[in-house]
Amino acid sequence: MALKIRRNRAPAPPETCDVGTCMLVLGGAWTPNVVWFLSGGPRRFGELRRDIPAISAKMLSARLRGLEAKGVVARKVLPGSPPSVEYALTPLGREYVPAIQAIAEVGAKLKALARGQAS
């Protein structure tokens, strides 16, 4: 006997999926980390490398370029010899911080749950 297919009671999705659009920005490896550390204020490239020691310079550079292209990060060249570059979140970039924080809180709960089940 075949099972009856139930109707989905979720609201109809928007014409373009907003979650997917958002995740196109946050979905890359290290991207949430970069956004998180920039949430504390502007950082230079070397400071971000120290903040995220496991990321390679090539990957960090690629993430920063991608975030800049999507309007999440602003790049500012500082005068001096040698010139340095500072990265900061744009207003759009700051909107991602509560979402990343909420995801981190759920992750902490999942870890605690896994520790409780492992005992």
Image (spheres, rainbow, N blue to C red):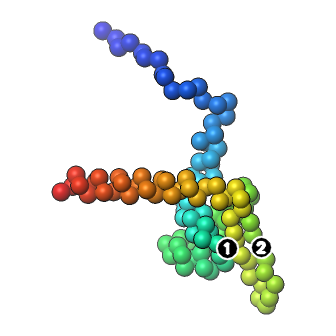
Q: Quadrant of the N terminus?
A: top left
Real-space Cα separation, disc 1 to disc 2, in angstroms = 10 Å
Numbered label attached to residue 76: 2
* Res. 36 image quadrant: bottom right
**Side (left or right) of 15 relative to 33:** right
The reply to whether residue 49 is in sight is yes
Secondary structure beneath dot 2 equals strand
The reply to whether residue 58 is in sight is no
Closer to the eye: label 1 or 2? 1
Q: Are marks 1 and 2 in contact (CB under 8 Å)?
A: yes
**Side (left or right) of 2 relative to 42:** left
Expressed as whole percent of the image width and height from the top left, the position of residue 98 reads 56, 56
Residue located at (61% from left, 55% from top) = 96
Secondary structure beneath dot 1 equals loop
Residue located at (22% from left, 52% from top) = 117
Residue identified by numbered label 1:
42
